[in-house]
Each structure stands twice: as structure tokens, then as C-alpha cells.
Image (cartoon, helix red, strand yellow):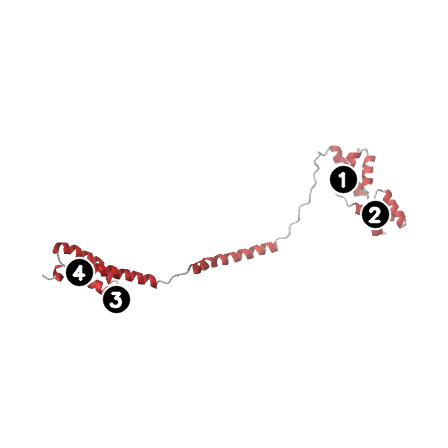
């Protein structure tokens, strides 16, 4: 009986392997299991071993060639293209966020800083609180120089240190007080320029402040 009849699996495997090598087709892949079956059959029948071995060699070689050609044929994507593709959505998402932040900054009104509050380290006594209240009342009524307001509080019976602390704790524009007093004197009576300056100095303003105040209202 011929090898073909005694071991048809070996013959089939060899034919498939040869066809696959010629055409670079998938028959090489199919030839490999047939070659293993032919080898197993050759152990019992003693025929077809050489064909099976050749079929295995050609089948594996053809399979490797087929896989390699497929890998080469697959288009590769460069790393730079991948990075650009991933970075593009991030840039697209970041642009609206930046625009929104700029729009919010443009529409947000500027904040006004809170007024600075000066807190004395020493505790405020009831007497000092009353002196501050008296000083504010006097300023609401008429104009005073700083030293004149201290003297007025001392005249009311407050100690000199309390009167000075009370006046120093107030936020007063003494230049504006000098101008206000100069206008009050002019509304009340007639003054020459020099006599009005002398009167403001007598009220406790410095001569330079008195001169600027008179220049502003005279």
C-alpha cells in the first residue's frame, strides 16, 4: 500500500504547506495541524514521517512569513501623531475655559478695599469714649483746630491725656477745618487777608495751614 493510502494526513499537510509557500496563503496555517496528525499516524503505520516533517517545516515557515507580512502591511501611527491627537481636545477644552474666565473677570466689578480700622493697644475707658463723643459733637457743630479741640475738651473737665487721645483717635482733615473756620469768620464779619490769617493762627492752626486756608476762601 502506498504512503498516500497509509498516511493521507501527511500527504495533505505537505500539499497544503507547498501551496501556502507558493501563494503566501492561510493554507500554511492549516498544514501545521495536519502535519502533527501525520506524525502521530506515522508512529503506528511507519509511513509518511518524512512528508509530515517537511509539512511542519514549510507550514511553520509559511505561517511566520504570513504573520510578518501582515504586520508590515498594518499602517503604523507615529507617537507624535498620537500626542497631537490627544493634545488637540485638551486645547479645545482649555480655550472655552480661558474665555469664560476672561469674561468673568471683565464683568466682575472692582472690589473696594475695606476701610482700615486702627485699634489702640490700650483699653478704651468710659471717660475716653465720652471724650471722643464730645469731640465729634463739637466738630459737627463748628470748625476747630486740633489744639483748639483739645483745649475745648480740657475746658469741659477731661484730663489733658484723655483729651489728646480722644482728638488723636479721630480722622479729621485739619486743612478742611481751617478753610471752614475761615469761611465762618468771613460770613460773620469782615476781615483783611492778614487779620484772618492771624485769627486762624490764634485758633491753633499753624501759619502755613492758615495761609493756605485763607488763599482758598479769600
- Which residue sits at x=50%, y=58%? 91
The numbered dot on residue 51 is 4
Circles 3 and 4, Cβ within 8 Å, touching? The answer is: no
Label 1 and label 3: CA atoms lie apart by 107 Å
In the drawing, what numbered circle is on residue 23?
A: 3
Alpha carbon distance from label 2 to label 4? 125 Å
From the viewer's perspective, is residue 205 above or below residue 2?
above
Q: Are marks 2 and 3 in contact (CB under 8 Å)?
A: no
Most foreground residue, 101 or 8 = 8
Say which residue label 2 marks. Answer: 208
The residue that appears at 18% across and 62% down in the rendered structure is 12
Q: Which SS class for mark 4? A: helix
Tell me where residue 56 sits by quadrant.
Answer: bottom left
Relative depth, front residue between 145 and 130: 145
State how far apart marks 1 and 2 are (Cα).
21 Å
Sequence-earlier tag: 1 or 3: 3
Please give the name of the residue rendered at 81% of the width and 38% of the height, measured from the top-left corner. Answer: 150
Using a 10 Å C-alpha cutoff, classify the residue at mark 3 as few (fewer than 14 neighbours), some (14 to 19) or many (20 or more). few
In primary-sequence order, the first of circles 1 and 2 is 1
Question: How crowded is the residue under tag 2: few (<14 C-alpha within 10 Å), some, or many (20+)?
Answer: few
Query: Which of marks 4 and 1 precedes in the sequence?
Result: 4
**Residue bearing mark 1:** 168
Q: Residue 143 appears at what percent x and percent y?
A: 82, 44
For marks 3 and 4 on the same chain, the one whose residue lies earlier in the sequence: 3
Check disc 2 and report its element: helix, strand or loop.
helix
Q: How many numbered marks appear?
A: 4
Amino acid at each position: 500500500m502506498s504512503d498516500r493510502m497509509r498516511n493521507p494526513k501527511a500527504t495533505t499537510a505537505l500539499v497544503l504547506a507547498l501551496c501556502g509557500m507558493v501563494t503566501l496563503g492561510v493554507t500554511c496555517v492549516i498544514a501545521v495541524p495536519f502535519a502533527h496528525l501525520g506524525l502521530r499516524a506515522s508512529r503506528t503505520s511507519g509511513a509518511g514521517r518524512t512528508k509530515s516533517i517537511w509539512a511542519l517545516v514549510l507550514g511553520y515557515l509559511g505561517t511566520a512569513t504570513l504573520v510578518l507580512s501582515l504586520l508590515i502591511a498594518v499602517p503604523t501611527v507615529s507617537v507624535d501623531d498620537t500626542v497631537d491627537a490627544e493634545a488637540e481636545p485638551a486645547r479645545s477644552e482649555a480655550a472655552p475655559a480661558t474665555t469664560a474666565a476672561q469674561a468673568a473677570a471683565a464683568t466682575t466689578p472692582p472690589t473696594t478695599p475695606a476701610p482700615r480700622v486702627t485699634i489702640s493697644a490700650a483699653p478704651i475707658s468710659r471717660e475716653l469714649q465720652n471724650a471722643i463723643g464730645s469731640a465729634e459733637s463739637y466738630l459737627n457743630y463748628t470748625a476747630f483746630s486740633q489744639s483748639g479741640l483739645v483745649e475745648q475738651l480740657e475746658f469741659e473737665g477731661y484730663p489733658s491725656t484723655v483729651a489728646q487721645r480722644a482728638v488723636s483717635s479721630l480722622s479729621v482733615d485739619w486743612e478742611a477745618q481751617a478753610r471752614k473756620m475761615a469761611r465762618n469768620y468771613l460770613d460773620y464779619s469782615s476781615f483783611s487777608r492778614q487779620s484772618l490769617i492771624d485769627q486762624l493762627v490764634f485758633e491753633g492752626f499753624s501759619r502755613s495751614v492758615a495761609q493756605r486756608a485763607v488763599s482758598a476762601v479769600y
